[in-house]
Amino acid sequence: MPVTEGQIMNHSKQLKHRLFIGLMVSILAIGVAAANDSWLHVRVDENNGGGEDVRINIPLALIESILPAINSDEFSGGIIRLDDFEAEGIDLRELVSALRDAPDANFVTVNGDDGDVRVMKENGYIKIHADDDGDKVRVSLPLDIVDAMLEGGDNELNILAALKALSRGNHGDLVTVESDDTSVRVWVDSNADQ
């Protein structure tokens, strides 16, 4: 039985439709896999040998799915309300926007008897370094994460949006603390184990 031109056209349309659906499903699967590839790690080591070491490895996708289920006076829907926070006329969003547009630089340096503190912008990160009596604290926040946290209303931090922004990149170390007796490291990467 000969195949008609109409049958060929119909079969071609069906094949294109299936390829399009297959491509869309593949793109969605890759997107879900990429979102699920980011892990939040917390590592605490007691350096004096008498304490406990702690290892926490949590996929960011799990945290994102749990946060909306937590509801309290200060935290609901992934948003922290800072009711007692007074910015005294400071628009935090405008401040972060200005920082994003500013060149990389050390903005604040304080050297004192009680310790040293530096606040700087470097390669799209706000960094805070604090040194005090042998203790070293390093905080490194990507500006896109700070932007996401400020997506909430006034006196709110959108933690859920910040986590989603974290899952879109491999940001490395976020917080490190080194002291005589304890080391702390908080970071995000694509490895399930640390």
Image (tube, helix red, strand yellow):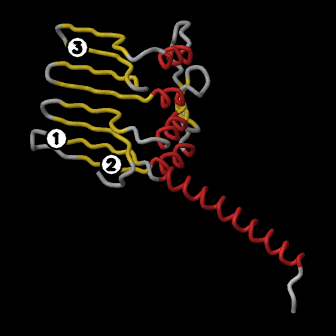
Answer with the quarter of the image where residue 120 lies.
top left
Q: Please, is residue 51 above or below residue 86 in the view?
A: below
Q: Earlier in the sequence, mark 3 or mark 2?
A: 2
Q: Amino acid at mark 3?
A: Asp
Question: Which residue is tagged 1?
Answer: 46
Question: Which residue is tagged 2?
Answer: 56
Q: Amino acid at mark 1?
A: Glu
* Disc 2 packing (10 Å; few <14; some 14–19; many ≥20): few
Look at 87% across and 88% down and name the residue there: 2
Q: CA distance from mark 3 to mark 1?
A: 24 Å
Identify which residue, 19 or 153, lies in the foreground.
Answer: 19
Q: CA distance from mark 3 to mark 2?
A: 30 Å
* Disc 3 packing (10 Å; few <14; some 14–19; many ≥20): some
Question: Which residue is tagged 3?
Answer: 116
Q: Please, is residue 66 above or below residue 145 in the view?
A: below
Q: Earlier in the sequence, mark 1 or mark 2?
A: 1
Q: Are marks 3 and 2 in contact (CB under 8 Å)?
A: no
Q: Are marks 3 and 1 in contact (CB under 8 Å)?
A: no
Look at 28% across and 38% down and name the residue there: 185
